[in-house]
């Protein structure tokens, strides 16, 4: 019997997968910034990465200090609206956009901690397709909710159809059954609902029902008589919320309310002082009065670069709500489409660790001045007052290293000249899954993958006598991977050593020399002639279609034998 056919979202170029090089990161101290005075609780190990965000994510994925450690991912990717944004190419072709998102989401999933979650803002143009892509990456069962954020509080009278006033926030957990978001903080409006008309010694309270919508069938004929002689039964179709023992305790504690005149249906006095939760769970509709709006966001970013404000920022209150629901102080937050740096600014003020990635020059022109003011306590806007932020902490500014390999004048792949021994050792550790940790005691110990497994990287050519000397020092209980440019035969006789030549050892592992995975329209791969013949009439330009390239949501999986989709 043929295998079962599954439903999947397909698009042009879906099978094209980038072969990413795991780059190392190089700090640029000119743009790093730390507070002049160190205070207890300050966080300094925050990271801002300038470079292609897919390569940067790959660099983080191969970092054991980040992989599986991120509590909250927030991304605000280009919405693919066709708008001419100055800082982003936001007019990506539909299929290209889906591929761009899929490739990044797969790595972001690997970065999440076991109790982590991802929050993605997107508009109607791609939200429903993105939901299906996310189902494929994170698993449909890990979908938490689609929150609707009111980004505009005015109606566009010149709208041709309906006035667009909202964006979506797609929320996925890495493991939904074990994941629980925080609850919202209690507001003054909530507390105002609690009063104390009878001057109860426990303070303000609110009347809540004694019955519930569900319960045991055995309790259908439940009755209870209170000390004032009133006999109570739950209304038809409902069940008692409390046992007789609990009702007796509440009655003795004067925690049952019979109304001002004593003749109302009994209810429980729920005391404000006894509430065990900080507030209610978050609703899925976020009004601008609670989560900010576009106008508010633009006013916030103007303070950091008034001459050239970022075109599509998100308000600090929106990010604050997400971070508040998804994390606790000290947790790690990641934004790989950093834009104007709102995520890092808010995470910093709220006492979270953060990593941001940004490709454009506004990593320096917008994010750096913003974070400098936050750290120096000069940012008085956004959520500063609500978070009680006074300044402090810091971050390090990194850029992606160039590609490890380049071609020489004879068209041979060689190690790039910019790579010094330390950079080379760190790069090889990334390629082979070792933690880069040079030892001050052993020259041959550049990194390790376990307590007994190590790696040594050198550009020297090693003789057999040198290899045997290293083998003796490594000992029988440890193993060593040696990466060198050349070595004499006989190494296979040394059981605790594995010797590999560089660059041959990594030559086929990835694509070299590619620095831009932003996937602009003009970079679409050329299609074969037979592929072009299958398309509707379009210009044979090598570009994918725009309007008629809409994915087929119900296309059968080509890997299955069955050609018919099944319900």
Image (cartoon, rainbow, N blue to C red):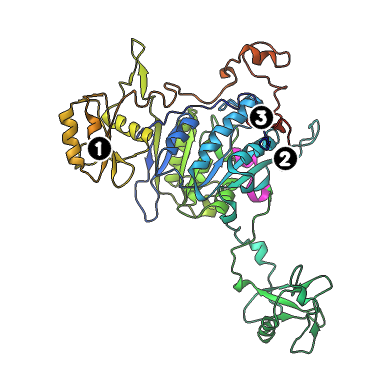
| Closer-to-camera residue (145/367) | 145
Residue 18 appears in the rendering: yes
Name the residue beneath numbered marker 2: 165
Quadrant position of the C terminus in the picture: top right
Q: Which percent across, then down, holds residue 332?
A: 47, 48
Q: Residue at x 34, y 46 (%)?
A: 36
Residue 565 on image: x %, y % = 73, 34
Q: Earlier in the sequence, mark 3 or mark 1?
A: 3
Q: Are marks 2 and 1 in contact (CB under 8 Å)?
A: no
**Which residue is rendered at x = 40% and y = 40% of the image?**
63
First of labels 2, 3 by sequence position: 3
Is 155 situated left or right of 398 in this image? right
**Answer yes or no: do the residues labelled 3 and 1 have beta carbons within 8 Å?**
no
Q: CA distance from mark 3 to mark 1?
A: 49 Å
Task: Specify whether 177 is left or right of 511.
Answer: right
Residue 288 place in picture, x, y as percent: 67, 47
Q: What is the chief secondary structure element of the magenta stretch?
A: helix
| Tag 1 secondary structure | loop
| Label disc, if present, on residue 495 of the rendered structure | 1
The local secondary structure at tag 3 comes to: loop
Q: Nearer the viewer, residue 437 or 35?
A: 437
Residue at image coords 67%, 63%: 190
Tell me: residue 351, above or below residue 355.
below
Magenta run includes residue 483: no
Q: Give the spatial CA distance, label 2 vs label 1.
A: 67 Å
Label total for image:
3
Magenta part of the chain: 288-298
């Amino acid at each position: 019997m043929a295998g079962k056919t599954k439903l999947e979202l397909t698009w042009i170029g879906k099978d094209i997968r980038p072969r990413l090089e795991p780059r190392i990161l190089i700090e640029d101290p000119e743009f790093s910034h730390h507070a002049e005075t160190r205070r207890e609780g300050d966080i300094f190990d925050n990271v801002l990465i300038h470079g292609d965000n897919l390569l940067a994510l790959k660099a983080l994925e191969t970092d054991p200090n980040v992989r599986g450690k991120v509590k909250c991912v927030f991304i605000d990717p280009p919405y693919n609206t066709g708008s001419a944004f100055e800082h982003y190419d936001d007019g990506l072709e539909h299929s290209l956009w889906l591929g761009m998102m899929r490739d990044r989401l797969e790595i972001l999933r690997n970065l999440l901690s076991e109790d982590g979650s991802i929050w993605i803002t997107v508009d109607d143009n791609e939200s429903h397709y993105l939901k299906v892509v996310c189902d494929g990456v994170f698993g449909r069962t890990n979908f938490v909710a689609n929150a609707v954020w009111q980004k505009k509080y005015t109606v566009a009278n010149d709208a041709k159809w309906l006035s667009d006033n909202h964006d979506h926030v797609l929320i996925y957990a890495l493991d939904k059954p074990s994941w629980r978001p925080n609850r919202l903080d209690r507001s003054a409006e909530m507390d105002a609902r609690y009063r104390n008309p009878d001057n109860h010694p426990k303070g303000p309270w609110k009347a809540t029902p004694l019955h519930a919508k569900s319960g045991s069938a055995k309790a259908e004929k439940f009755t209870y008589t209170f000390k004032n002689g009133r006999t109570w039964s739950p209304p038809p179709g409902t069940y008692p919320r409390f046992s007789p023992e609990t009702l007796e305790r509440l009655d003795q504690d004067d925690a049952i309310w019979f109304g001002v005149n004593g003749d109302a249906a009994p209810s429980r006095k729920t005391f404000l002082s006894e509430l065990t939760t900080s507030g209610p769970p978050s609703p899925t509709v976020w009004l601008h009065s609670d989560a900010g709006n576009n106008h508010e966001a633009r006013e916030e970013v103007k303070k950091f670069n008034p001459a050239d404000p970022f075109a599509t920022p998100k308000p600090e209150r929106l990010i604050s709500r997400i971070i508040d629901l998804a994390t606790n102080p000290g947790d790690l937050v990641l934004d790989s489409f950093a834009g104007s740096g709102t995520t890092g600014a808010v995470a910093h003020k709220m006492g979270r660790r953060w990593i941001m990635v940004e490709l454009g020059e506004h990593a320096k022109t917008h994010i750096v001045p913003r974070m400098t003011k936050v750290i120096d306590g000069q940012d008085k806007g956004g959520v500063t007052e609500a978070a009680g932020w006074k300044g402090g902490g810091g971050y390090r500014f990194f850029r992606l290293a160039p590609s490890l390999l380049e071609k020489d004048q004879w068209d041979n792949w060689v190690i790039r000249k910019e790579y010094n021994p330390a950079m080379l050792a760190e790069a090889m550790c990334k390629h082979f899954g070792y933690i880069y940790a040079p030892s001050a005691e052993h020259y041959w110990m550049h990194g390790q993958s376990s307590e007994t497994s190590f790696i040594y990287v050198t550009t020297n050519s090693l003789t057999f006598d040198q290899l045997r000397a290293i083998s003796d020092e490594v000992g029988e209980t440890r193993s060593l991977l040696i990466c060198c440019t050349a070595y004499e035969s006989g190494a296979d006789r040394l059981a605790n050593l594995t010797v590999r030549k560089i660059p041959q050892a990594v030559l086929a592992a990835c694509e070299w020399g590619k620095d831009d995975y932003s996937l602009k329209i003009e970079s679409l791969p050329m299609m074969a002639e037979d592929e072009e013949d299958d398309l509707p009439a379009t210009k044979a330009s090598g570009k994918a279609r725009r309007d008629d390239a809409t994915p087929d949501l119900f296309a059968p999986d080509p890997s299955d034998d069955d050609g018919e989709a099944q319900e």
